[in-house]
Amino acid sequence: MANRVNLSESEMPRQWYNVLPDLPVPLAPPLDPQTHKPVEPQVLSAIFPMALIEQEMSAQRFIDIPDEVLQILGLWRPTPLVRARRLEAAIGSKAAIWYKDESRSPAGSHKPNTAVPQAYYNKKAGIRRLATETGAGQWGTALSFACKMFDMACTVYMVRVSYEHKPYRGILIRAYGAEVFPSPSDRTRFGRSMLASDPTSSGSLGVAISEAVEDAATHNDTNYALGSVLNHVLLHQTITGLETRKQLAMLGIQPDVLIGCVGGGSNFAGLVLPFVPDKLEGKKIRFLGIEPHACPTLTRGEFRYDYGDVARLTPLIKMHTLGHGFMPAPIHAGGLRYHGDAPILCHLVHHGLAEAKAYYQTEVFEAARLFLQTEGFLPAPETAHAIKGAIDAAKAAEPGQNVVFLYSGHGLLDLSSYDAFLRGELKDFAYPEESIKEALKACPDIKGD
């Protein structure tokens, strides 16, 4: 059997797949935080272009990808599906392990799959600048690249602990022409209030989102762009799962387990959503999302309405949440340190169509080192979670089964994290139950939760 499955550029998907019309139970709508009524599209138009708002709520099963977007995605897409034979041998797996390699993009991750269309639709709407947050820096890098492709300005608020741990991400963001600031920052009202209460705050994605949303809402020429969570982001990421379906079909095999790391949920959902119709038809496919014990949103969070940010500037969305005031431990997988998850993904988990598992960061880095020493490539700490999940799934699988995971990004700009691991300086952390209960007290009381 092949070690690598490549698609030609002409085989790249021309449409995104929208799971919303196929969900057996409708997705709960986002709510206005004041009225608790479903959010009207015009409310979202303050920070998003109408094209993305329409995609967020679309009932179309397939949505055309614009030619201008396809041309830029064609710089690196389609991406290969690779058999990890040496990893299989190292763990004594009787199952096949495959990975969809999204590390080939200019940003080194899956993130440009949505950054490019978001920049395109905003440019078409006459927007000059995009403001965003970033955890580990992958999304900030992707959006700065995309904005450069469409001659737009870009401002990135990077979670402070990652800003300090991953300086080379900041360099790459600035090299693309964007500006990047550690969050909380002194550039926004909310950032200044956070620093006033805690000058040494390590920050969080919830805080950085608040800063980016405030920036966009207070400048007429600026919109907000989000790298995960929202329906339209997951829609754009389905290009990975659609390609994977084609590649597996070329091999004549059916996946038994599909695995991805989960922070906000975009890379995992992008892989699994195109397989949801298969699962609903009765095919036995497991969707397994992997998260850190330090931020156990799917495994220990409550499924309820909550804000997407600390300042409560966003609409209320129904998701698994640890509470919008959650302040995560400064683990090295900065992209997985978010208090909530994508509503679509949480909906799948709540209804038993997907599942989640949590790991400690030291066991995740051990899995990453094994992948490096067998397959030769250094994964991002976030991606290493998917690798750990795939290793355990393959060990438990029956002979002849197929485990497929999304290799969401490389770790070549995360060497300080690996240095800390090799020095034995990484500490395992599990978010305390009493802290979760305390953080959840701040969630709004919504009838029907």
Image (cartoon, helix red, strand yellow):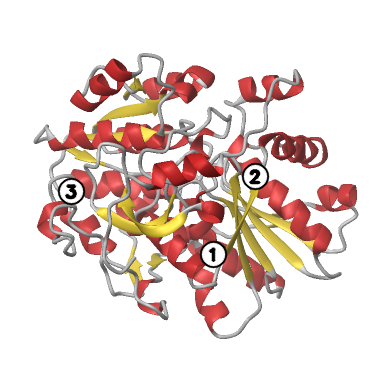
Identify the residue under disc 2.
385
Q: Earlier in the sequence, mark 3 or mark 2?
A: 3
Residue 416: in sight, yes or no? yes
> Residue 306: where, in percent of width, then height?
32, 52
Q: Rounded to the nearest whole Å, what is the CA distance between mark 1 and mark 3?
A: 30 Å
Q: Mark 3 falls on what kind of element?
A: helix
Front residue of 157 and 196: 196
Q: Rounded to the nearest whole Å, what is the CA distance between mark 3 and mark 2?
A: 37 Å
Which marked residue is nearer to the observer: mark 3 or mark 2?
2
> Residue 103: where, in percent of width, then height?
58, 42
What amino acid is labelled 1 in the image? Val
Q: How many marks?
A: 3
Residue lying at the far bottom of the rendered structure: 281
Decide: few, some or many residues near mark 1? Use Cα within 10 Å; few <14, some 14-19, many ≥20.
many
Q: Quadrant of the N terminus?
A: bottom right
Identify the residue under disc 3.
124
Identify the residue under disc 1.
272
Q: Mark 1 falls on what kind of element?
A: helix
Residue 196 versus residue 329 in the image, above or below: above
Tag on residue 305? none
Q: Rounded to the nearest whole Å, what is the CA distance between mark 2 and mark 1?
A: 16 Å
Residue depicted at 13% across the width and 43% down the height:
126
Residue depicted at 66% across the width and 36% down the height:
361
Which marked residue is nearer to the observer: mark 2 or mark 1?
2
When asked about the image quadrant of residue 248, the answer is bottom right
What amino acid is labelled 2 in the image? His
Which marked residue is nearer to the observer: mark 1 or mark 3?
1
Q: Earlier in the sequence, mark 2 or mark 1?
A: 1
**29 left or right, relative to 253:** left
Residue 342: in sight, yes or no? no
Residue depicted at 63% across the width and 34% down the height:
429
Q: Mark 2 falls on what kind of element?
A: helix
